[in-house]
Image (spheres, helix red, strand yellow):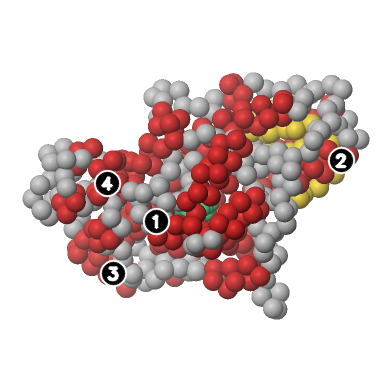
Amino acid sequence: GTTILWFRRDLRLSDQAALVAAAKEGPVIPVYVLDDETPRHRRMGGASRWWLHHSLQSLDASLREKGSRLILRRGKSDEVLAQIAEESGAGRVHCIRHYEPWWRNAERAVADKLDLVCHHGNYLAPPGSVTTGSGTPYKIYTPFWRSLKDDMPPREPANRPRDIPVPSDWPKSDDLDDWGLLPTKPNWAKGFEAEWEPGGAGARKRVDAFVQEAARYESTRNLPGVEGTSRLSPHLHFGEVSPAYVWHRTSSVGGSVGTFLGEIGWRDYAQNVILQFPEYGAKNARDQFDAMEWRDFRSATVRDEFDAWTMGRTGYPIVDAGMRQLWATGWMHNRVRMIAASFLIKHLLIDWREGEQWFWDTLVDADYASNATNWQWVAGTGVDSNMFVRIMAPLTQSEKFDAGDYIREWVPELAGLSDPYVHDPEAHGCRPKDYPRKLIGHREARERALAAVKEI
Ligand code: FAD
């Protein structure tokens, strides 16, 4: 009979287990529901909505090549799907399982109303399936990865089905342009268009390009001035390619590709963390940090400093370059994410959750599990964490990871400064007038942070 294929963050036709299953059963109605109600305050942020718009366009085009199409509806997932089932007589819904707490709720709500079949496919192994000998889930990455790796490689990725059977009547669909997913005025996404091609074809191009570079990953991945990483994160987040596909394309490259696959493993690990701790995006895993006296976000000074951080005007060039790259492109290099996050938490002593929310709104790869896991890791509040007292020195990091070109690219006020000066113009007495002074000195910040954590 007719089935509904419920798309979420799995916007692809290849290696799409739910599509394969649905196509075997008869006519398929591919549906995307824009659901801002189920996630409530975790509705998608601005950058993600930009991505989503283009990715849905691309998915619809791929479906149309096969004579099918994408039905768009807005509302609460379970209600919308029940409505479509009633209109079309569809008996069953196929989807790929998701692990965000609100998606788990939505899956339960849909299953209460309809025959829902959830498939595995967005992770290397189904989250929750990698356990210790005694059957408990891992809390720490290293043993998790060791155990996951034993079960690899993942199964061969499946091709897209040759035919997608279509229903005799299509249910009505919204017009994507009416969803208002794109910025209006000002159009902050201009730089996104130059950087990204959302959708399956763009994702596969990134994979093709990265295969050429993957063997050198270990030596270039920490250099923000070099394009040494894959930039697959938004494509993986939206499920435009499956991790199994990425694994099979890259694993035979040799060189340091094992390090890259370990990063794909971090992505799986983060899902396992939120499966165990669904509130990870909002609650310190180490609850002694609940007593931490973060600086008061209601104070105007603190708000101003937070705003300076978001705008890339902290006076620390490496931090500012990262924050401006984020604003301009929706993405930031991983090394710089760590430096910028650490700066907010430890130098400005602002609660990591404020930074997590800013990233949630501005990253094209904003991912509940990966974002929360990494913020808690940097903060030292997480299950598997750095120690809070290990405070990154942004200037040392900047020099060590050779960020001169990166700073010159993203902080045009500093474009004329050569290498030793560009990392810390203030200390060298060559700070241009239009570049801000440091919000706080490193030593002073370090002492304040250490004193605050000692209190708890
Ligand atoms: P590559 O180095 O090419 O890695 C390949 C893939 O592995 C990535 O595409 C990503 O899917 C995965 N990956 C790599 N590093 C990590 C990691 N540390 N944790 C989880 N998965 C990883 N990543 C997100 O996808 N979404 C987020 O919301 C996110 N928030 C972050 C917040 C902070 C404070 C920090 C420090 C890191 C965050 N990361 C997040 C992880 C990491 O920075 C990005 O995944 C990476 O920079 C993406 O670039 P890439 O695709 O070129 O990575």
Total label count? 4
Amino acid at circle 4: Asp
- In this view, which residue lies farthest toward the bottom? 134
Give the residue pinned by disc 3. 450
Label 2 SS = helix
The image shows residue 246 at horizontal and vertical percentages of 60, 51
For marks 3 and 1, the one nearer the N-term is 1
Instruction: Using the image as rendered, state which of residue 66 and residue 285 is in the foreground.
Output: 66
Q: Is mark 3 within 8 Å of ligand 1?
A: no
Q: Is residue 116 left or right of residue 298?
A: right
Give the residue pinned by disc 1. 220
Q: CA distance from mark 1 to mark 4?
A: 14 Å
Which residue is drawn at the image coordinates 70% and 42% (left, top)?
A: 14
For marks 4 and 3, the one nearer the N-term is 4
Q: CA distance from mark 2 to mark 4?
A: 53 Å
Amino acid at circle 2: Lys
Q: Is residue 21 left or right of residue 139?
A: right
